[in-house]
Amino acid sequence: MLMFHANERQLVQQLLVVLQTLPGVHANVAPCEPAGAANDRGYDAEIDLSIAGKSLTLLVETRKTVYPRDVQQALWRIKSQANRSARPDLDSVPVLAAESLSPGAKDLLRTEQVGYFDSGGSLYLPAPGAYVYIDKPPPKAQATVMRSLFTGRRASAIHTLLMQREQWFGVKELAERSQVSPATASEILRELEKFDWIAIRGQGPNKERHLRDPRALLDAWAAQVAGSRPAILRRYFVPGTKAEALVDRAAQAFEAHGASYAISNEAAAQRYAPFLSSFGQVRCRVLVTPEATDALADLGARVVNEGANFAIIDVKSPGDLLFRERVGNAWLASPIHVYLDLLKGEGRAKEMAEHLRNERIGC
């Protein structure tokens, strides 16, 4: 093995273990090279591989974290390393090994026929005469980073970028529209740049960003929601009112008491983009305040464990009601929020979510 840092050596060892567990595969790290060879050749390790009766050399370059922009910068060098292989008698396959690889980075590497490995166990080898593709959940560190993008104040900034995806934003403008601090807005923009989801123009104080890949960003948010725990709801029964009429009745009660709310899930989606013939429950995002409690009392809503026709999704910040829309007599949660809330729902909620995305969101 060539001389390199301990964490890089550990990553190559993990790759070796995964290769050795594959049926019909034999893998060994090539003998050590003289000091300085790693720098001359540009890669960190060389693995001799026998797969399906064919001998190959894997030229492994190691990184800590890889995003699409890192792949774009590295592709020419990675491919040139393979062409300058020290083993001309063997086919060489360039492999980028990292502690974590973003989904976009993996897509780019597969498109360019460059192998990859991450510490979560994902492996792609486009070898001549052989093909290996193992897709595993992302490593814990990457999953934590992705999850943090879509929580708290950060989610408000992402929500703004998705809802106003045709616009260019400076940090200050994004912060104001998202109701977050400039530090949070700046942090989100930097993170999204790593995934190559943001276009940039200008420099310094005049630097602006624009969401260039809203579909990928919304897909990532949806994936996080789908893998999260079901929403915690406060469930009520409101007597004497069918679900459709309950939307307007609840709206009237909340507004009479000055409570902030937004109808969500099936009731809102049905008004944005009709899909179901009927629905049996109204779900509503409500800012937790004494005024909201008074409104529920006026509705005659009583807490139940079963048979609920009205449910509250508690929100803690006005940012969770951003971009709500007035439709008829009621405020509806933004189409993005309705879509994400539906992904946590039951029954045909997920079908309705996709219908809403296609018909109303459009990305």
Image (cartoon, rainbow, N blue to C red):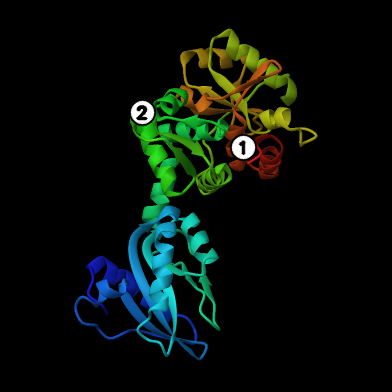
Q: Which residue is mark 1?
A: 339
Viewer-nearest residue: 42 or 221: 42
Residue at image location 21% in from the left, 75% down from the top: 36
Residue at image location 24% in from the left, 83% down from the top: 32
Q: Which mark is residue 81?
A: none
Q: Which mark is residue 182?
A: 2
Q: Name the image quarter holding the N terminus.
A: bottom left
Q: Residue furthest left?
A: 35
Whether residue 106 is visible: yes
Image quadrant assignment for residue 280: top right
Counting from the top left corner in percent of width and height, residue 291 is at 50, 12
Image quadrant assignment for residue 121: bottom left
Q: Tag 2's secondary structure?
A: helix
Counting from the top left corner in percent of width and height, residue 283 is at 62, 29
Counting from the top left corner in percent of width and height, residue 35 is at 19, 78
Q: Earlier in the sequence, mark 1 or mark 2?
A: 2
Q: Relative to 163, is 26 above or below?
A: below
Image quadrant assignment for residue 153: top left
Name the kind of residue labelled 1 in the image.
Answer: Tyr
In this picture, residue 42 sits left or right of residue 358: left
Residue at image location 43% in from the left, 45% down from the top: 193
Viewer-nearest residue: 296 or 263: 263
Whether residue 239 is visible: no
Q: Tag 1's secondary structure?
A: helix
Dot 1 crowding, Cα within 10 Å, few <14, some 14–19, many 20+: many
Viewer-nearest residue: 64 or 262: 64
